[in-house]
Image (spheres, helix red, strand yellow):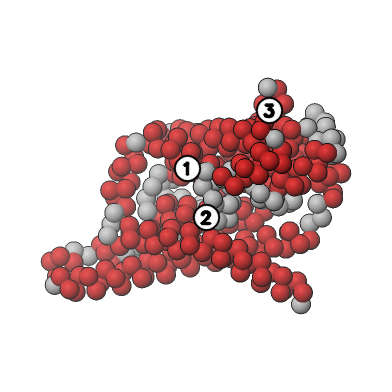
Amino acid sequence: MNTIIYILEFVFNAISSIGLFFIIGISIASIIKTFQLDRVLRKAFETNKRASIPIASGTGTFSPLCSCGVIPAVAALLASGVPLAPIMAFWITSPLMDPESFVLTYGLLGKEMAVARVLAALGIGLTAGYATLYFANKGLLNNQVLKNFRKESPANMDLEKDLSRLQIHVVRVIQFLINFKDLGLFVGKFILIAFVLEALMIKYVPMDWVGRALGSSNPYGPILASLIGVPAYASSISAMPIVRGLMDLGMDKGTALSFMIGGGATSIPAMVAVYSIVKVKTFVLYISFSMVGAIVAGYLFRLF
């Protein structure tokens, strides 16, 4: 009974923290679908893909969204027809850094670690964006990456010919509500599952075993840290006290950086949420960029 109460409280607090972002993201996507703005949006991004990737990486690096909280925004953008490359850049960087994390990292772990996290987030985001763009240009990715959400909107009717102005406005409102409901349910149910998993992992996965595994420096530290970050759920903020304790036990900064990146982007709840809404190729890309990025960042930090 205590576990159920804990999960309900955790899920309620988590939903409250992202509720505004969820509503805004779904509303924007619904407006775009209702007024068929996705064609304009798609054309704009198609002609400026390369320029949009650095902007998406920078925006994601300083956005307040976690690995699960970013899912509604990503789903809304994908449903609106935005190309995958800039979305991938934003998607990867969002869980890795935000203004609060930067300040806390600077205070708890020092200037070097704070700067390294920012550079790692930007570097991984840019790499993921341009690599995704390359794969898309080579025809290795499908245009439609969302799972099971391809509903034709009534907006496809030529309303201007058949209805009065007042009737058009009424129909547009109905279309918006239908689109909001469809997309909200599609994304929301998977976010709920991810939050339940997150609550269970935080409650039952003991962090002392992380300390035993990563407490001393070893040549495979970044690899091990990125792998351990998957079951040992640690957000961009909650990871810092853990990392501070592990560094006191002898963990080097490169391994610490890999753990923070791996735990933030590739936790089991995040992977469940990602896998639930996108097709396999996109899921594999997301996980690969996150894991490889965490490992490479750790070794580069060791080197320099």
The outermost residue toward the bottom is 1
Front label number (1 vs 2): 1
Q: Give the labeled residue for mark 2.
A: 71
Give the alpha-carbon distance from disc 3 to disc 2, as whole Å.
Answer: 29 Å
Q: Are marks 1 and 2 in contact (CB under 8 Å)?
A: no
Q: Which residue is mark 1?
A: 59
Q: Is residue 185 above or below residue 131?
A: below
Q: Say above or below: 190 vs 116.
A: below
**Label tally:** 3
What amino acid is labelled 3 in the image? Phe
Left or right: 80 with respect to 242? left
**Cβ–Cβ under 8 Å for marks 3 and 1:** no
Q: Position of residue 147 (x, y in %)?
A: 48, 57
**What is the quadrant of residue 157 in the picture?**
bottom left
Q: Name the spot of residue 155 as percent of width and height, x first.
A: 26, 64
**SS at circle 1:** helix
- Taking the spot 29% from the left edge, 54% from the top edge, the residue there is 37
Quadrant of the rendering where the N terminus is positioned: bottom right
Among the 4 quarters of the image, the one containing residue 251: top right
**Label 1, residues with CA under 10 Å away: few <14, some 14-19, many ≥20:** some
Left or right: residue 234 versus residue 215 is left
Mark 3 or mark 1: whose residue is earlier in sequence: 1
Looking at the rendered structure, which numbered label has been put on residue 209?
none
Alpha-carbon span between mark 1 and mark 2: 15 Å
SS at circle 2: helix
Residue drawn at 49 percent across, 39 percent down: 57
* Type of amino acid at the residue the image marks with label 1: Thr
Name the mark nearer the viewer: 3 or 2: 3
Which quarter of the figure is the C terminus placed in?
top right
The front one of 145 and 87 is 87
Task: Quickly name the residue at label 3.
Answer: 301
